Amino acid sequence: MSDQIIGLHHWFDSPPGRYLLAWEQARLDEAVADMFGYHAVQLGMPLLDGLRTNRMPNQWLVLGQEAASGDAMPPDAGLREDGTPRQAIALLAEPVALPFAEASLDLVVLPHTLELSIDPHTALREVERVLVPEGRVVISGLNPLSLWGLRQRRARLYQRFGRGSLYLPDVGEFIGYRRLRDWLRLLSFEVESARFGCYCPAVRSSQWIERLGWIDPLGERWWPIFGASYFVVAVKRVHGMRLLGPAWRTAKQRTAATVPVAHRTPSPPGTAHRR
């Protein structure tokens, strides 16, 4: 797993990796800017500053094996683009066992965290545990149903015959959006928004990525679910309870409501009653 983390971080330093990180950073800045609360946490991926536009007073960056692997940590991981310091690395912990109390966080950011986790479903269950009701989780990941994913599967097939090289880092099986959505629903999350991006074909040079930039607006309009990356915002829902009154009170009210009342219709004036 440590080698997979190093490989993913090194890949993000390539032209397609920087292209994908730029798109995800823009989506993060838009999504977390209007999320309010007191405590926010980013789990993993120090290359992305997932909380820089958020205004919660308490923000922490939690790393697992990235911190243990020196090669996975970039030298400027603690600085923003303008040179100002970002949130410091506060804890060393794995997503499957978070050292936070139950219902103590308002926002959790998972940039490619589930892909690198030893047990992504358990990690997501931990996030549900530490989030407060109506708290939010922001998830980004690589989409296997994309041009990049197709090239990755083709490269794996060629490698069986001793040919070709992988386009994406070898981090195991990528988690598709539909599968992630089912996990979220199972844990009582409601998907608030989902976006896909990076529709450029699987090329390696920055020149070709710039030349093919015109494909991004077309892909977002005509084949949105086939972007190389997905970005999901989900809300933790806790269903309320309806308090029922005592059975004897309900029966008493029902009995009182069904008592018949006799109504006498008055006779018109000047009419005689027949005997």
Image: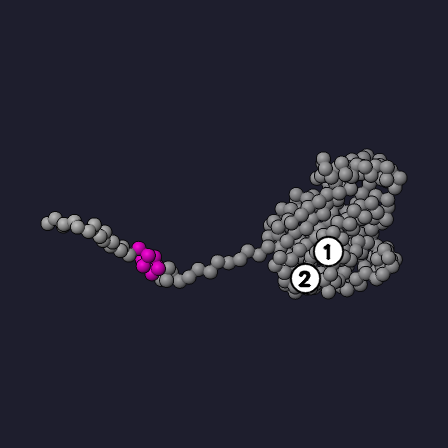
Question: How far across and down, in percent of the image, does residue 125 sit?
Answer: 64, 55
User: Residue 259's quadrant in the figure?
Assistant: bottom left
Q: Residue at image x 55%, y 56%?
A: 239
Q: Residue furthest front?
A: 270
Magenta region includes residue 257: yes
The answer to whether residue 226 is visible is: no
User: Residue 203's quadrant in the figure?
Assistant: top right
Residues in magenta, as a range: 251-258
User: Which residue in the structure is indicated by mark 2?
Assistant: 37
Q: Which mark is residue 33?
A: 1
Dot 2 surroundings within 10 Å: few (below 14), some, or many (20 or more)?
Answer: some
Dot 1 surroundings within 10 Å: few (below 14), some, or many (20 or more)?
Answer: some
Question: How far across and down, in percent of the image, does residue 267 sit?
Answer: 20, 51
Q: Residue at image x 62%, y 46%?
A: 182
User: Residue 165's quadrant in the figure?
Assistant: top right
At label 2, the amino acid type is: Gly
Q: How is the image coloured?
A: one colour
Q: Residue at image x 69%, y 57%?
A: 35
The answer to whether residue 198 is visible is: yes
Q: Which mark is residue 4?
A: none
Name the secondary structure under disc 1: loop
At label 1, the amino acid type is: Ala
Question: How far across and down, in percent of the image, does residue 37 sit?
Answer: 68, 62
In the image shown, does 257 or 204 lie closer to the viewer? Answer: 257
